[in-house]
Image: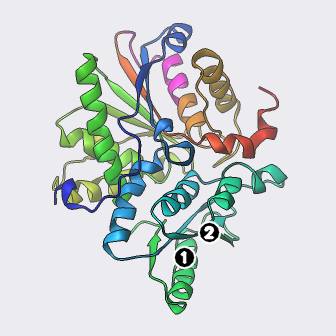
Amino acid sequence: MAISDYPRAILAHSPTPLEAMPNLSRMLGGPSLLVKRDDCTGLAMGGNKARQLEFYFGDAQAQGADTVIITGAVQSNFVRMTAAAAAKLGMACEIQLENRVATKTLEYKVSGNVLLDRLLGAKIHYFPEGEDEAGADKGLEDIAERVRGEGGKPYVIHLSPGHPPLGALGYVVGAGEILDQIAEQGIQVDVIVLASGSAATHAGVLVGLRHRDSDIKVIGVCVRRQQDQQFDRVLNQANTVAEMVGLSNAITKGDIHVTDDYLGPGYGQSSPEMLEAMALAAREEGLLLDPVYTGKALAGLIGLVRSDAFSQEQTVLFLHTGGTPALFGYRTILDGI
């Protein structure tokens, strides 16, 4: 199937800006650095999930659903933007928040994305575990069954592998947008660095580039899993997405580049490198990063520059996937910056 064959609900403000980061480039003394501003997708404070949700909500509408159900961490950007998309499209939304991050701070539990979830009118449920994707999905199915019993038509956005990664199609399109922008601006990009978590964005970008015959290297900075686990997840998801858009066997092991050197203690947990990256982005380029995804992804880019992974002649693009509201849920870890 072509991407145009998949139902799509337009939600993102696109194209998002592609900008230089001259101050950070000069400070690090390495390659030229660019940033793709997918924090500017517009939907309820923006982020990469707007592109992914276009395909999930398109499918939900095509199926006649009236309620969308999703799971994620307490400070999940995906959950927040799903609630916003549902409100925009006149649908109900039920969300399940998982206990992925060990913290007792009140702001993590009630501020940031959680505050917005409530404002957007989502019905909130809780799941006690943080590393049980199958169990979390079972929780979603239980909610869906209740919705059906009440006469509703639920649509579930699953978390675990084994379900069509429709959201990744958003970044097949997004990668094409990047290629169009650099062509228009006369820029050659050698490497894209991004946060690699669920792998939907990572896989989508990779497939989107290869779909357009681009050999730009994509480096994923692990934000949830160890490198070996993430490598397999990205490879499997990328090949699934490639098949979905008619590019069977387009992605090989040689296309997958991930590093867990900047994961720190784990998902949603602070590291010195992440705090430094967040401070540098804010004070050198006026960019606000989040502690869970983009802070660690930029820490990875900075670490790679400092380790001479790139030459000074290269151009590296950082994909800013948003997450700004989570800053307010993590206030205490920012006190030392």
Instruction: State how far apart marks 1 and 2 are (Cα).
Output: 7 Å
Please state which amino acid type lies under the numbered disc 1.
Leu
Q: Residues within 10 Å of mark 2 (few under 14, many from 20)?
A: many
Q: Which disc, if any, is residue 107?
A: none
Among the 4 quarters of the image, the one containing residue 20 = top left
How many numbered badges does the structure rendering display?
2
Q: Quadrant of residue 264?
A: top right
Residue 234 is situated, as x and y percent measured from the top left of the image, at: 38, 51
Q: Residue 140 has which mark?
A: 1
- 159 relative to 331 in the view: left or right: left
Question: Callout 2: helix, strand or loop?
Answer: strand
- Where are the magenta residues, as a range? 300-312
Location of the C terminus by quadrant is top right
Task: Out of 212 and 129, give the one closest to the viewer.
Answer: 212
Residue 96 badge: 2
Query: Residue shown at 28%/56% (left/top)?
Result: 241
The answer to whether mark 1 and mark 2 are in CB contact below 8 A is yes
